[in-house]
Amino acid sequence: MILGKVSDELIDSFSVTDSNDKLVPGIDTTSFTFNVFNPEDNEVSSSVNLSVVELGFGHYRIKFTPDMIGTWMFAAYHPVYFPWGKTNNVKVYTQDFDSITVFIKRILGLVQENFEIDQTEYDTNGNLTSSRIRIYDDEYSVGTDSNIMAVYQIEATYDDQCMKSYKVIKS
C-alpha cells in the first residue's frame, strides 16, 4: 500500500516483462490502460491528472493526484505485454507524515517523555499556581535551552485548598 496526501501527486512504479520474463523497454505509454478508483468506488482516471512515463529498461511509473482522503485503487494494463496488469491501493490522508510526526512528538512530550517542569510558583498553602512545561527532541537536551519542541504555561486556581481550574496553554 502506498501512503499519500490529498492534492499531492502519488507515484507508483512497475516493470513490464515478455513471456520469457525479459524486460520490455520502449512501450508507447499511450497504449497502456489505466483505471483509478476513488474511495467512493468511482472510476475517475480522467479527472485525477494521470500520467505514465518510462523510466528505462522496461520500468514505468504512474503518477496521479488524488482529490479526497480515503483508500484509492489503481490498475495498469497493456494488451500484449501486461494483460494481467498491476494494481495497488493508495491510502490518502489530509496531512503528510512529516507534519504528523511533529504532533506525535509533542504528544509524547506531554505524556512526559523528554519533559521538564520549571519556573514553579506556589500560593501560601503550597498549591502550585503556575509553571512552565518544556518538551525536548531528545533526552540529552532536557533542562537546557536546546532542542525545545514546545513550551506550555500552567495556570491553576484554588478554592479552599481544592483545585478550581487548571490550564495548560501552548506558548
Image (cartoon, rainbow, N blue to C red):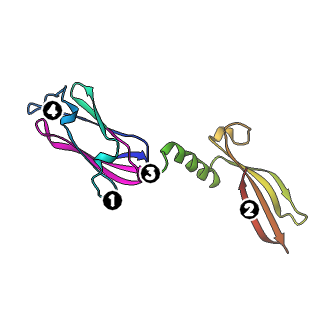
Provide the residue designation for mark 4.
17
Provide the residue designation for mark 3.
93
Q: Secondary structure at mark 3?
A: strand
Mark 3 to mark 1 CA distance (whole Å): 15 Å
Which disc number belongs to residue 105?
none
- The residue depicted at 68 percent of the width and 38 percent of the height is 141
Q: Amino acid at mark 2?
A: Lys
Q: Amino acid at mark 4?
A: Thr
Q: Amino acid at mark 3?
A: Tyr
Q: Indicate which disc, 3 or 4, sits on the residue closer to the N terminus.
A: 4
Mark 2 to mark 4 CA distance (whole Å): 63 Å
Q: Main secondary structure of the magenta part?
A: strand
Q: Secondary structure at mark 4?
A: loop
Mark 1 to mark 4 CA distance (whole Å): 33 Å
Mark 3 to mark 4 CA distance (whole Å): 33 Å
- State yes or no: residue 78 in magenta: yes
Nearest to the eye among marks 3 and 1: give it. Answer: 1
The stretch in magenta equals 63-92
Which disc number belongs to residue 167?
2
Q: Amino acid at mark 1?
A: Glu
- Circle 2 Cα neighbour tier, 10 Å, few/some/many (<14 / 14–19 / ≥20): few
Q: Indicate which disc, 2 or 4, sits on the residue closer to the N terminus.
A: 4
x then y, percent, for residue 44: 30, 50
Front position in the image: 46 or 53: 46
Q: Indicate which disc, 3 or 1, sits on the residue closer to the N terminus.
A: 1
Q: Report the number of numbered marks.
A: 4
x then y, percent, for residue 77: 18, 41
Q: Which residue reaches farthest front?
A: 46
Marks 3/4 in contact by CB < 8 Å: the verdict is no
Provide the residue designation for mark 1.
40
